[in-house]
Amino acid sequence: MTCYPTRAKNLRVPFIILYNFLISPASLQIRWPPLFIAALTHLKAIALVILMKKFCSKLLLTIIILPAAIGAAPVFSRAFDDSGKNARLYGAVFDKENKQPLPGANVFVLELKRGAPTDEKGAFSIDGIAAGRYTLVCRLLGYEEMRKAIIIAEMNLKQDFYLKSNPIELQSVNVNAEKDNTVLTESSQAREVLSDAELQKHRGQTLGETLKEIPGVTVLQTGPAIAKPVIRGLHSQRVLVLNAGVPQEGQQWGGEHAPEIDPFSPARIEVLKGAAGVQYGAGAIGGVIRVEPRDLRETGGLGGELTLNAFSNNLQGAGSLLLEGSLAKLPGFGWRAQGSLRRAGDSKTSAYNVINSGFDERDWSVAAGYNKERGGVEMYYSHFGTELGIFLGSHLGSVTDLLRAIERGRPSIERSFSYDVDSPKQDITHNLLSVKSHYEFSGLGRLEMQYGWQQNHRQEFDAHAPFSSKPPSFPSFDLTLTTYTADLTFQHQPVKNFFGKIGVSGMRQGNVQNSRVFLIPNFRAYSGGVFLIESWVSGLWTLDIGGRYDYRLVKAFQLLNEQVIETIHEYSNVTGVVGLIYQFAPTWSIGTNWGSAWRPPSLNELYSNGVHHGAAQFEIGDLNLKSERSFNVDVTLRHLGARGRAEISVYNNRLRHFIFPFPDPQPTLTVRGAFPTFRYQQAEARLRGIDGLLEYQLSNFFQIGISAALVRGDNLDAGEPLFLMPADRLRVLAHFHLPDFGRLANTFVELNSTLVKRQNRFPKNADYADPPAGYTLFDLNAGTQLQLDGHPLQFNVSVQNLANKSYRDYLSRFRYFIDDPGRNIIARVQIPFGQFERE
């Protein structure tokens, strides 16, 4: 590799700054956790950047003049790029069996997020690629995906693909827009896929925090440690989370009950925006989140990866160790084991510590499987365990104290940083078992079977015992939820232009209350469904159609006057969807989706009548609630070009009998204190909006991006806005890809800004406080790879809330009492060893 002195000189300055910072006295004042200090001792190559106030002001000035920098991009491009090193990648895609060219396939470079579709002769071409190592991916509806590792070291490189035919795996007539590539004709709804490479930037953070950069996705927060994803204004039981193919069942009805998933385990996350009830059953009105672990190893050998994280704001230390292997004497057998630890203390706003906001989490999982050409079987078992604190100032003794706390706007009592997790708190464990198998019937299709077992144990502790100021020795409520699921799906072989699948599913569920306080009753639930999905592809047109029937029986056992009263609830309904896609140009397509989905009311919406301690609110249910019915229409325009991609979606979701918690004018005083009161209501509602993104590569080293989301939720019966809808938001990104330097490769610096408008659409005089002001946040992210003994060590440093701004988000359930977190510096390092390859 040729070294250029002018480049080395330019790059030497920031490295000297980093080195001087690490050894300066100012760096010793940062609150790094012990785990990270140990990591620094053994990994001297880690460089951390802290931006002090003077430097922040200069950086903000740089952001202001960013448009000028964009205009000057060609000048910088000539300074950083050697035109002689920009190569052309070209080739063609063929059917493996008959060797015929395949038009409409999508070929893209995973690391560069760039690609091109094949023309009528199956040919493709991607220009302007710098020398280096890349992963090339080829996809086409009805064929197996193929990936190839390539090295570009010359001007032109030819790479052909021969794809193997495979029955289409439709996701509820679902989706289209991936983070690494937009597949223009895959289906009719909008989706985002976060690959393993994208997830590296968020390792160690919650599922909600990982997804919130996706347009149309926000988070419902309950303090700094609990974040739950919100898709186009809908969340909780309206958004289905699939963990290793199994629907996650963990008391998800609670707004502060975040998905119990190890943040280090996903290798791929797919987000489907919009109703998806045909494939996944009743409840998927708002969308689906598919969390998939790493695939089992297929080649012989042993390998793994060690991941270490450190967070400055709450002194969180996190780590994960992954081991995987296979047996050379038993081809097709693979195994994997992973363990993760996360521990954090009190979070800090820009001005004060958030008392009792720490957590202690311990997770592990194991997997094994045996796969041959015609069939296979895999087993996956995971354990999630956490103890997390609830902000102490949210549990108050009287109505007067509550109103004063809201008026004061900050905690009345402050303390120094602590790792202690005291009451109020949550103690949660979640165990999941998944067993799945498949078999290929020659000339017929593919049969898939999956069995799931889950047990969720949730304990919530009040701040003090009844009629006492001391913490309780027993939980205020103690729930154990056990769920069994089974799914059987058959995907038939293509019949001319038709692809599709048929399936049946069933679930048995039981909830046991082990405490003295019954927020929801014990219950037994049984449900089953059958669905059919078919897709027709002809030229530039794709038509999808699907239908499903579901039945659900719930037996509730309510304790009244020391007697158990059994009540039976029965629900049944149908779900349907029609989607159409037209690829009107090689790089453009438009799709529309018309769907209807439903969900029955959950037990908390029917029976709640007490304090929900984790949420610090008093909830009142309604036994007369009816099933929700959604009528959703969306239109999505997509573009995939050589240098960028774009997607914009417009949607209208009409909801009949929409269920929502509405605040009572006065809080409720109980023996445990005073709490804001929310009563479940039902109304005709409408959610409509627009979300989208644009990414464009101005040069080989500079890329810009912009994304936006607007949601309008209305209570049509009352003629007023819906309560707790996400505010308008805009995100702007500038990504700089630096040239390789010595053993450093794939070095980048990324600056983004998030602008959130004040929510001005809310029911008047219905909340305890008006929505908070809008805000603007700046984040910085930088990373590089260090080649060491043939292994790429990954280093990443992020600074969230760069300016340490004081703000409150409207979707924060504790916005009445405290600000959201201040500046947070995050350092990550990933160390592969043995025979390990990142997906």
Image (tube, rainbow, N blue to C red):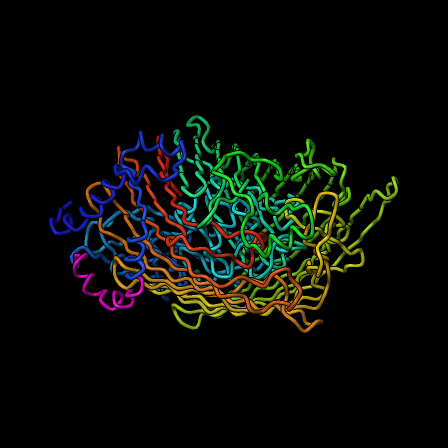
Q: Is residue 155 left or right of residue 490?
A: left
Q: Residue at x 54, y 40 (%)?
A: 375
Quadrant of the rendering where the N terminus is positioned:
top left
Q: Is residue 623 above or below residue 788?
A: below
787 is higher (above) or lower (below) than 173: above
| Left or right, 14 with reference to 645 | left
Residue 448 x %, y %: 59, 45
Viewer-closest of 3 and 661: 661
Residue 194 visible in image: yes
Does 75 appear in magenta? yes
Is 390 in the magenta? no
Does the image show residue 379? no
The magenta-colored residue range is 63-83
Does 730 sit left or right of 629 as displayed?
Answer: left
Q: Quick one: which residue is furthest to the left in this view?
A: 5
How would you classify the magenta stretch by its main secondary structure?
helix
- What residue is drawn where x is 40% and y is 45%? 200
Residue 753 place in picture, x, y as percent? 39, 59
Task: Name which residue lies at 43% across and 32% down.
Answer: 321
User: Can you tell which quarter of the image residue 114 is in?
Assistant: bottom left
Q: Nearer the viewer, residue 181 or 50?
A: 50
